[in-house]
Amino acid sequence: MTKWHMIEAVVAGYLLLLARSAWKQGEFRQFLRSLLIVAVLCAAIAGAVMLAAALDS
């Protein structure tokens, strides 16, 4: 197991604990909406980096 696999496992476990907590508090829809916003922001940053790399070469 590499360092990246371990980091992925820790992040996945943390997200599962957050989801369980949100479910118990009745805020699961808000958790999913927040998770979607973070995923969109990460995708936008990745797209900007890919575009910059493509234009640089």
Image (spheres, rainbow, N blue to C red):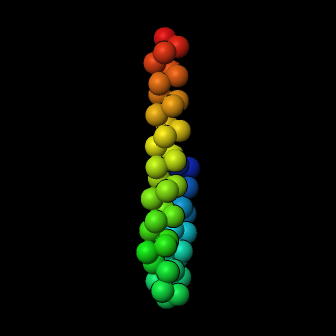
Q: Foreground residue, 21 or 10?
A: 21
Q: Is residue 1 above or below residue 32?
A: above
What residue is rendered at 46% in x and 18% in y? Answer: 54
Q: Foreground residue, 20 or 4?
A: 20
Residue 32, position in %: x, y? 44, 68
Q: Is residue 44 above or below residue 26?
A: above
Judge whether residue 8 can be spotted in this image.
Answer: no
Q: Foreground residue, 48 or 19?
A: 48
Exactly how many numbered labels are in the figure? 0
Residue 57, position in %: x, y? 49, 11
Q: Is residue 30 above or below residue 9?
A: below
What residue is rendered at 45% in x and 59% in y? Answer: 36
Residue 35, position in %: x, y? 48, 62
Residue 7, position in %: x, y? 55, 55
| Residue at the top extreme, as displayed | 57
Q: Foreground residue, 2 or 13?
A: 13
What residue is rendered at 48% in x and 86% in y? Answer: 26
Q: Is residue 28 above or below residue 45?
A: below
Judge whether residue 46 can be spotted in this image.
Answer: yes
